[in-house]
Amino acid sequence: MSNAVVTLKKGEGRTLKRGGAWIFDNEIESVMGSYNDGDIVIVRDFDGYPMGRGFINSASTIRIRMMTRNADQEIDDEFIKKRVKDAWEYRKNVIDTSSCRLIFGEADFFPGLVIDKYSDVLVVESLALGIDKLKNKIIDFLKEELLSDGIKIRGVYERSDAKVRLKEGMERVKGFIGEEFDTNVTIEENGVKYLVDVKDGQKTGFFLDQKLNRMSIQNLAKGKRVLDCFTHTGSFALNAALGGATEVIGVDASELAVNQARINAKLNGVDDRVEFRVDDVLDMLPRMVEEKELFDLVILDPPAFTKSRSTIKQAAKGYRAINTSGLKLVKNGGYFATCTCSHFMDYENFTKIIAEAARAAHKRLRQIEFKTQAPDHPILWADDENSYYLKFYIFQVCEER
């Protein structure tokens, strides 16, 4: 803990005052007192008004990540335990907790920290220096909280290997926290079984944020021929199969992911109805259109096409192209699910792109559902740039008439 005081420039701190959690280096007028990077400091406005406390890091353009709006609050064990307990109690009320996100960074008031639970295993991603110093303490408190509800965690694996750590002046790290264990973990979600590779899988091993959206597909798939694009390890495809689809084709460019998807299909006993292919979806969709393929249900779940504001226009072209081709592959009266997982592709832009794609494909859309990420990935209002990223639509597709 440090007693250093950070004073903002006059007129700065607008994001913070709207409810955000970050203060950038160019917003700071002065820092009085000594500190080490990663320490908690007091933040004041230009006129001395107390704004709260947060972690400081001189190596990052995100100079301060706020922990509390109360400048008198000590960030001690009692404070951390209360935050951990609040996060767990929230999950118990809103989601199936057999596998879920337990800590979601700023939205759970632990800036830069993600902790996912896969059955009896925790996977941790720490992306900010200040929270990294508290990481092990938070994990221990979380394990204690889960144990009080009869849930014993058998292992913890760290996946702090994202490039963004370099911007914090931190090394990328990956490995066991505590004793080693088998990192292939079997989970069940919506009645679908998955083998999750927490060591080498994408992100922390599995995309938990689409849990309820996958259930929507399961409910819609009975008797249908389904195309699942960017299938990764097969989650939407498998939900469609267990929902009663007669034929499912899942496509992904990653051979590793497709091999995992095939294992998951066998695990669920649907490998006779689900075919997984290794292919570049961007090339495959126009080819299928030329071949006059048609499906009852087409699903597009692409990776983020943009991770910065500077590439939004280019990303829009990509989203427009895949949605136009995808819509052309849907039978008249069939169904179309599409999404974006990019923070920077906001609701308005994404909705506009879909409308443009529908016009280009000469289709009319009847909206069935609009969803975001599952509630274990809560959207914190006024700080939604950090917490709101997934936009998911389901439409019925009709020919123009």
Image (spheres, grey):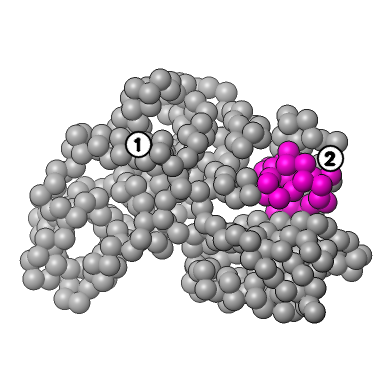
The residue that label 1 is drawn on is 89
Above or below for 178 versus 102: above
The image quadrant where one finds the N terminus is: top left
**Residue at the image point whose x is 78% and y is 30% from the top:** 269
Q: From where the camera sits, is residue 377 visible?
A: yes
Q: Which residue is mark 2?
A: 273
What span is colored magenta in the figure? 217-246
Classify mark 2: residues with Cα within 10 Å, few (<14), some (14-19) or many (20+).
Answer: some
The residue drawn where x is 49% and y is 25% is 120
> Is 367 located above or below residue 378 in the figure?
below
Which residue is more in the foreground, 231 or 400? Answer: 400
Q: Is residue 293 left or right of residue 260?
A: right
Position in image of residue 355 (x %, y %): 65, 76
The percent coordinates of residue 261 (x first, y second) are 73, 39
Q: Quadrant of residue 74?
A: top left
Of labels 1 and 2, earlier in sequence is 1
Q: Where is residue 256? Give x, y as percent.
A: 71, 42
Q: Does 236 appear in magenta?
A: yes
Q: Residue at x 68, y 63 (%)?
A: 395
Q: Is residue 239 magenta?
A: yes
As shown in the figure, which amino acid type bears the numbered disc 2?
Answer: Arg
- Give the quadrant of residue 316: bottom right
Would you say 294 lies left or right of 104 here? Answer: right
Callout 1 secondary element:
helix
Q: Looking at the picture, does residue 210 appear above or below residue 288? A: above
View extreme (right): residue: 291
The amino acid on which the numbered mark 1 sits, given as a three-letter code, is Glu
Q: Residue at coordinates 26% horizontally, 58% vertically from top-left?
A: 64
